[in-house]
Image (tube, coloured by chain):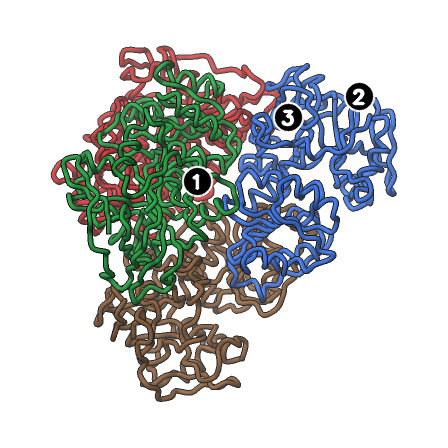
Chain colours: A blue, B green, C red, D brown
Amino acid sequence: MRALVYQGSSDKALEQRPIPEISASTDAIVKVTRTTICGTDLHILKGDVPSCQPGRVLGHEGIGVVHEIGPSVTTFKPGERVLISCITSCGKCLYCRKQMYSHCTSGGWILGNTIDGTQAEYARIPYADTSLYRIPDDDEALVMLSDILPTGFECGVLNGKVQPGGTVAIVGAGPIGLAALLTARFYAPAQIIMIDLDNNRLEVAKRFGATETINNVRSDAAKAVMSMTAGRGVDTAIEAVGIPATFELCEDLIAPGGTIANVGVHGAKVDLHLERLWDRNITITTRLVDTVSTPMLLSSLHSQKIDAKLLITHRFRLDDILDAYETFSHATDTRALKVIIEV
Amino acid sequence: MRALVYQGSSDKALEQRPIPEISASTDAIVKVTRTTICGTDLHILKGDVPSCQPGRVLGHEGIGVVHEIGPSVTTFKPGERVLISCITSCGKCLYCRKQMYSHCTSGGWILGNTIDGTQAEYARIPYADTSLYRIPDDDEALVMLSDILPTGFECGVLNGKVQPGGTVAIVGAGPIGLAALLTARFYAPAQIIMIDLDNNRLEVAKRFGATETINNVRSDAAKAVMSMTAGRGVDTAIEAVGIPATFELCEDLIAPGGTIANVGVHGAKVDLHLERLWDRNITITTRLVDTVSTPMLLSSLHSQKIDAKLLITHRFRLDDILDAYETFSHATDTRALKVIIEV
Amino acid sequence: MRALVYQGSSDKALEQRPIPEISASTDAIVKVTRTTICGTDLHILKGDVPSCQPGRVLGHEGIGVVHEIGPSVTTFKPGERVLISCITSCGKCLYCRKQMYSHCTSGGWILGNTIDGTQAEYARIPYADTSLYRIPDDDEALVMLSDILPTGFECGVLNGKVQPGGTVAIVGAGPIGLAALLTARFYAPAQIIMIDLDNNRLEVAKRFGATETINNVRSDAAKAVMSMTAGRGVDTAIEAVGIPATFELCEDLIAPGGTIANVGVHGAKVDLHLERLWDRNITITTRLVDTVSTPMLLSSLHSQKIDAKLLITHRFRLDDILDAYETFSHATDTRALKVIIEV
Amino acid sequence: MRALVYQGSSDKALEQRPIPEISASTDAIVKVTRTTICGTDLHILKGDVPSCQPGRVLGHEGIGVVHEIGPSVTTFKPGERVLISCITSCGKCLYCRKQMYSHCTSGGWILGNTIDGTQAEYARIPYADTSLYRIPDDDEALVMLSDILPTGFECGVLNGKVQPGGTVAIVGAGPIGLAALLTARFYAPAQIIMIDLDNNRLEVAKRFGATETINNVRSDAAKAVMSMTAGRGVDTAIEAVGIPATFELCEDLIAPGGTIANVGVHGAKVDLHLERLWDRNITITTRLVDTVSTPMLLSSLHSQKIDAKLLITHRFRLDDILDAYETFSHATDTRALKVIIEV
């Protein structure tokens, strides 16, 4: 089969690989029909993720058809359409029993990281019963439920306690920030203020339902947020970039009693200004997505409460996946959000 | 001033009364600009509410302008526009300090019940600082925030734990059931099933966002709900009628783990089938509205997350309030939901 | 092996049965070392539980040693000591993924009900990885964690929202009511009022930490509770009997804003006095134990935050299990709480 | 009257001052019977609190007798015994209505800060109805409820989500850390690990119920905590010192899914290691005490669920308050926790 393989030193290639085989009784082999590229894949290519070694098939998102199941798999049969969760969950360990699948002691984020992933014709999915979800058809919008929508929703919206009538600021209007925006709307907040450096993305945010936008190249975002919120700051600040400046911006615009929900992947420490914040009754949260909200998101997609397709800007064939990477990694120029790879 | 006065024996009249005066330092006198009639007013007229004695000015809803304030009132000044909450809250007692204003030891529901109410040119509002809310203008939609929207939201939606992707059934498509419907949409549930005997009201419910409707004259509502929910029942059942049959219907259509939120005013006991429900992990709640959500609802109205005007079907002058009662009390024929009285 | 078998018509016998065998790859066979008798077993003998047919080995509680495992079991090995949960959980279904193991679509309460149980030398435990818990030794107190302590804690204390400084009434001082009492103390409520007809049990409750007791043969319990709580009623009322009179007593003694947590197994409907309760802001809950708290209870037992041994009054050998049933079923005379059967 | 007055430049003196007078209708004048000194008072003397200017009577804790009330005060009468809350709450503003009294727009922490305080024979208490609590007697233990116990409980224990069976580390065994320890026990956690540099204080912590102690002069506290928690870290880490090193220690010992509850008053920013914590599903909270738990703590004290007296080590007469400051500010030598000033 064809598979996109990480070569080390920023390199990758579409290679021929053998179709994966069942190695544990709880495995399933899924024939991938559609996959996508994540910002994390770009991090791997930069060498930021040491757990992912050269030779690894990349990708942790996708939908497909069950091709083969191990003898212990009871929930799925060959031929059934499935969504692949970016998080593998054994369903048995201390963390899985607390619904914190991200920290599953033998799973978590392993696809396209410590085991071969989904940017290939076939993928082996461990703990298939608790890591796949049945889907009705091959709708490309479903690919958004592998990672980006549960991440925006769980790490940003749920952790950030978005509420009806509340005020939300989202720092970063990339795919994850926009996924947070789309899912924040589940709770009908009064204001969703989107902050980014890129006017194109801010225009997209407006179309997705942002009530206000701020380009923080040109203006003092904290000051602008204060003036938009009667001087109080926001109830929820969602950090969707992953650098110190954007996290510290969240510290500046949070209201007393508010919550900063970190979604960004950080490579460096940040300054936490407890000398200003110790008495402000704020909450800060971090989270690797648990994908506990996947059934709810499937239900919301099915009932048209969310239009996940909005996040998809480009489509490629697997044979052109290197072009897809090129497009996705130059998002400012290409205006790419999520790119679909048809396998 | 003119005031609608309860005469006892199902009777009422528009009388001349003196303008009320400040009697405690925390009182305000509000010049009422718009008021409305509540189903509870009809209950009073039937003699169902013994705490309300003949001679009482009816009404516990309305908006207006502050006319005069007692010496301890610090939040409002004469001339400011205000929303009158149906619940009076002292802000000091055990219950007020727990945000359970409905059980305020010297307040609660007293307007148009144990003290004179708002169907008059002026009303005395005790504990004005904690029982009035500042509003921007005289928009008639704001009258819906005195009682019906916080009641539907707090007693039905919040107590019923409506969630994104969840399933909701609302039994009773009268004004309160429709207020629950409008505010349930804050949480983007996948299904909102409306159940009523009146096809007109079910059509209204469809326009307000119900995903399915059931006329339970003609069909077995519990069976219909089961077939709409893959045999599981609903996560939230909101009882918005107040008779045994509708409450017991909720018992029949609730899913394991679900919540029955009672909103209806009941005059008789109901059968609770614990022999079937003891092991179903369900929750049942009752509540007199606390109006703790009023600031949030004001914010939601302001940000156009809810269109409260939809609930208003008729308008009358205060001089014609007897006609307004006539229209409101024959809702099946008149298709009345809420009627606005312009004072 | 020897096993206690339900014969139908109130009858039971200690029979010889073959040792159970692995029938699914996720099964384990456990050599039982200690088991006990539950009030539910007496219900079965009375014919109240139609799902349990004659020929069934009774019992859903116990500790033992893993004897054999199916090929998919990964968490336990033969020779390890385990606690058997009264609830079997597949770990995969909709309900298990929501931690509502009681409603597991292929598990739930099946041991000693729809499959053979634990009052035997060996028991087959389906879904062993998610239905057994590792334990350090053969301490008989651990048997209390199969059912009675999680039931009292989850259905009574957690559902009842027992809080520091709060007031609790427990109606019924049998084993389940006393388990609720012991675990209510985790939250340091200010008052725990125990209500029963049996003075001996009330004395036991005092020793277990009840702050007040009421014998409701001799006094009006609701009135007594009101006088003990400054006229307010209790924040939490736990029903631990299962008849209409005791549930309706809970309706009489609950404070505004309080919670009635039903634990009792009911055979008949009860009167819910919504004509009095509709505006009292109360919550009523039902629950079949999910055993989600088992790891926490193991930790609490290990750290000596609870003395589970207090619940054990009698000990028997398996050969004398008919005597054990005799003793347990005449608890008023024998003063039995839980009886340990040593296998 | 005699009053302890801040002179600026680390100086203070017992001066003669006029008895305060009612200046707003909601004020009460309280004759103080017992007060105490807080770590914050030492911060003021160091010049760390610029809002507190020279000439200010210090102190924000105490109990006493109502001496005089303003015309709007309805809850208290002269002659009644009261607890003075360190937080003044108007009961009307946006924050008070959300139970966030710490951020009351005209109150909050003002006593002994922006208005004269309680280290005096009399104190003026604004918003008396919502800032005083009725008490049964002059028990010195009640002084612990003005600040230290609600602070330890709300900022540490409630924010830290201490749970039955859980694991807790408290960094700092001063009065606040010990108050957190005493109130953490309301929730029966399995482990409470106390960390400090002072062996005497660690011995006190043991007597107060710590299950383990670590002197972090001599050992690597994070490593020690890991070995005490099977390598997982703690569910709750309470920071009760207020310097970067202790906050960062909390970052090192928190388990995935755990909560760091900051109680300490910080004068400098800290390093938040998001490069390690972004995917650990942790929560960090800050809070100025709201004193919403005061009624609950009064109830717990009354029902002997907490022995607040344990925190009191020394007693002085008001005339000797300078000695009291001397003793309190040299706590390592004097082994002082809280010192009572009898007025």
- Kindly identify the amino acid type of the residue bearing the numbered disc 2: Ile
C62 with respect to C28 (left or right)? left
Front-most of residues D198 and B92: B92
Which tag is nearer the camera, tag 1 or tag 3? 3
Quick one: label 2 or label 3, which is nearer the N terminus?
2
- Chain bearing mark 2: A
- Vertical position of residue D4 compared to residue C156: above or below: below
- Chain bearing mark 3: A
Where does the image place residue B49, in percent across and percent down from the top left?
20, 39
Front-most of residues C27 and C273: C273
Residue at which label 1 appears:
C297
- Kindly identify the amino acid type of the residue bearing the numbered disc 1: Leu
Q: Tell me the SS state at disc 2.
A: loop
Give the spatial CA distance, label 2 vs label 3. 19 Å
Residue at which label 2 appears:
A19
Where does the image place residue A278, in percent across and percent down from the top left?
54, 63
Q: Tell me the SS state at disc 1.
A: helix
Give the spatial CA distance, label 1 vs label 3. 32 Å
Q: Are marks 2 and 3 in contact (CB under 8 Å)?
A: no
Where does the image place residue D194, in percent across and percent down from the top left?
51, 60
Which tag is nearer the camera, tag 2 or tag 1? 2
Please state, as top left, top right, bottom left or bottom right, where the C terminus of chain C lies in the image.
top left
- Kindly identify the amino acid type of the residue bearing the numbered disc 3: Leu
B210 with respect to C311 (left or right)? right
Q: Residue at x 66, y 40 (%)?
A: A207
Residue at which label 3 appears:
A132
